Amino acid sequence: MSLDFSKESWRYILLPVYLAGYQAQGRSYQVVINGQTGSIGGQRPVDWMKVWLVIAAILSPGVLLALAGLLTIILGGVGVLLGGIGFVLLLVGLIVAVLILRKAMAMDDI
């Protein structure tokens, strides 16, 4: 008897691996979870209405303060500080909103 192992190939699999499939928003999604490292791979649905509501909630304080500062400048000239704070909040909100939007677009990978 002669054994030849020259064409043998191996694949290492880290176990346990959990596989799941689910339906959300009329589509099928698959998820793979590595049981040793806890890393997750797969697709995730994004609720765009919630994303836009969060972005609106982040931007609204800056817009409201900037408008209030503009109105007080027009009416009495004392809203420069209020308008400046509103403008800074609006810029910070825009940066955070862009980051949230990019993250949501990366999650919706179908």
Image: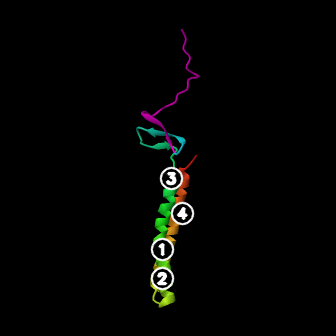
CA separation in Å, label 1 and label 3: 25 Å
Q: How far across and down, in percent of the image, does residue 93 sit? A: 49, 69
Q: Amino acid at mark 2?
A: Gly
Residue 19 vertical placement versus 82 (above, below): above
CA separation in Å, label 3 and label 2: 34 Å
Asked if the residue at tag 4 contacts the one at tag 1, i.e. Cβ–Cβ closer than 8 Å, the answer is no
Which residue bears the numbered disc 3? Answer: 47
Mark before the other along the chain sequence, 3 or 2: 3
Residue 102 vertical placement versus 20 (above, below): below
Secondary structure of the residue carrying numbered label 2:
helix
Q: Is residue 14 magenta?
A: yes
Which residue bears the numbered disc 4? Answer: 98
Q: Amino acid at mark 1?
A: Gly
Q: Nearer the viewer, mark 3 or mark 4?
A: 3
Other residues around mark 1 within 10 Å, as few (<14) / some (14–19) / many (≥20): many
Q: Quadrant of the N terminus?
A: top right
Which residue bears the numbered disc 2? Answer: 69
CA separation in Å, label 3 and label 4: 16 Å
- The residue drawn where x is 46% and y is 66% is 57
Q: Amino acid at mark 4?
A: Val
